[in-house]
Structures are given as C-alpha cells and as structure tokens.
Image (spheres, helix red, strand yellow):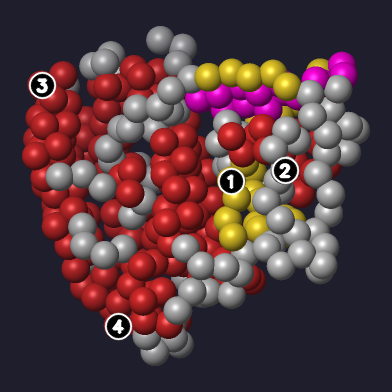
Amino acid sequence: MSAPIASSVASSSRGVPCPPLASDACNTPVWVIVSPHARWATEAQAIAVSSHEVSCTLHGAPAETAVWLDRMRHGVLLAEAPSPGTWLATLVDEALVQVLPATHGAMGPAFGRICDDWVRGIFAAPFWTRFLAGESSDIQVLAFLAQHYHRAAGADVHNRIAVERCTDAALRPLLLRQYREQRGQATMLAAGLLRCGPAARTFLDSGAFDATHALIDFIIGAAGDMPAYVGCCALSQAPAAVRAASEIEAQFDALARRYPSAAEGFQAVGAHARHDASVCGGTPLLAQWVEEVGEPDAASRLRMLRGAHGVAAAYRAMFDSLHRLDEDM
C-alpha cells in the first residue's frame, strides 16, 4: 500500500435512539463493526464520534451507546441492518461504522466497500498532507522508505507462513502463487534506499518502527487463521487501492521531484508498486477464494472483518509514527 487516496471531511449532528440486540427471529442478520479509524468521547449529554475524515455528534445519546461502540470494535451481530434514523444508522452513513451481511449473498462487493472506507481512512492520516506537499524532512522521507522496505521484507515472511499453515485445498494454491509472485521485492527497496546518500544506511540498519513490527506481527498471527488472513489481503487489494501503471509512475515521479535527494529510493518504491500491480492486479484473493469454495459462513465473515480491521489500524499507526517525526518541526 503506497498510494495516497483523497478523502473528504464532513460533519453531522443528530440525536437518535439505540438499536436492539440481535434476535434469532430475524433472517437477515448483519455484522456491524466500528471503523478502525473512529474515536469517541462522552461530552455532557452527547457522544462525539470522529475520524480524520468526519465528525458526528450524537445528542441525547443513551448511556449504553459508548458500551455498544466498545463492543463493536470487535464486531457485533445484529438481527438486521440498522433502522434509518437510529444513531447507529447515522454512524453507518458517515462511514464510522461498517455493515456486512452475515449469511446472505453479494458478500464480495460489500466487503470491498468496507475495505475502501478503511483504505481511505489510512491515507487520511496527517502524515500524508505534509509528505505529499513536499514538506517532509529528510529524516521523515528516509524513514518512510525504510519502513516500506521492512514492510516488504515482512510480507515475504507472512506470505510463506500462510502457505505453510493453510489446510484449505482450494486456497493453498492461491496463497502459494501469491508468495512466489511477491517474494524478494524487499531487496529492490533496500538497494534504492541505499542510493539515497550516506544517512540511508542508518535508517536501513536501525530496524523497523514498533508500529511497523506490529503490522507485520499482526498479519503473521492472522496467517494461522485463513479467513482472517484473507481479510488482511482483501484490505491491501481493496478496489480503492487499485491503480494503473501510469498512475503509479506519475505518483512516484512527483515524489522524486519533491525530494530529489531520495529520488532513487522513490524510483525503487515505484518499481515495487508496479510489480505488485502487475501480479496482483487481476482477481483479488477473496474473489478467487469465494469462486472456488463459495461464500464463507457467518463466523468466517467476522474473522475476515477482524483481519482487515487489524491491518487498517496497524497501517494507520505506522503512518502516525512517521508523522510524529516531523510534527514539532
């Protein structure tokens, strides 16, 4: 994931009632999960729920609203989609909460839309405003390139582990192909970074940020749970993250012009992104899996949501760590 994606900022303020718990009496259950980028706080008789893209204040919110939000960090099953006019429907409208059908068809497009929301949230991180404007320090730029290298090196590890742990006869060949097509790309990124001057070696040798380690470790952990791992991959292969080779080239050419001392590093990242686009630009892993074995059951859908959710939160934390390098400058 290396392409910045524009996002809008909006706000809303509504007072609406709390939804009911799930019921076995309804045959249209849905999973609801809070966006990994959402935060909330109680303010007198209101609860403010926000991300960097949107802020929504729920006036007169019931006391249990915050409890519901805490529960929805991990996914909650409801008997049916939130009713229009409720506080939960308001948060869904603002993409602060996402909804996925639990047992019915058309799961692929619905999951793709959720991943799109979360990808846009990643690239709404404050880091990107300064970085894309060409205002980042040399330290921040070299750290960005170094984390990109460490992330690619980590991908070789979790892609291999996923193949080793997979017992699904339909999924394993897909994972093996993904591993073979993507492995070894970190070498290219390291070479590009080392051509960015004497200081680059320090950034390469100092290791990954804690947040980058956390991202890699999360996906390695998910590699032992195939639905969760497919969810991780679906986040990285979200429709909003798919770009043409010309777009990739233009993006990294622009960054090379803004940061000429790191131009060769950005050229390497661009080559890496073009390679990923060429080998992963076809049918996403989730769609291939569904085509082979059919749509996953309700429990597997939740595990997929948690996989994508964890990766989105970890990517956001990595970019927030990069932002803190320059935030006092």
Q: Secondary structure at mark 1?
A: strand
Per the rendered image, the range of residues in magenta is: 44-59
What is the total number of numbered labels drawn onto the structure image? 4
The Cα–Cα distance between marks 4 and 3, rounded to whole angstroms, is 41 Å
Is the residue 58 above or below the residue 173 in the image? above
Measuring from the top left, give residue 289's x and y in whole percent.
38, 75
Residue at coordinates 26% horizontally, 65% vertically from top-left? 283
**Residue 83, numbered label:** 2
Is residue 81 or residue 280 the one in the foreground? 81
- Determine which residue is flagged by label 3: 257
Residue at coordinates 88% horizontally, 38% vertically from top-left? 64
Q: Is residue 324 magenta?
A: no
Q: Secondary structure at mark 2?
A: loop
Which one is closest to the eye, mark 3 or mark 2?
A: 2
Question: Does the CB distance between marks 4 and 3 fall below 8 Å?
Answer: no
Three-letter amino acid code of the residue under disc 2: Ser
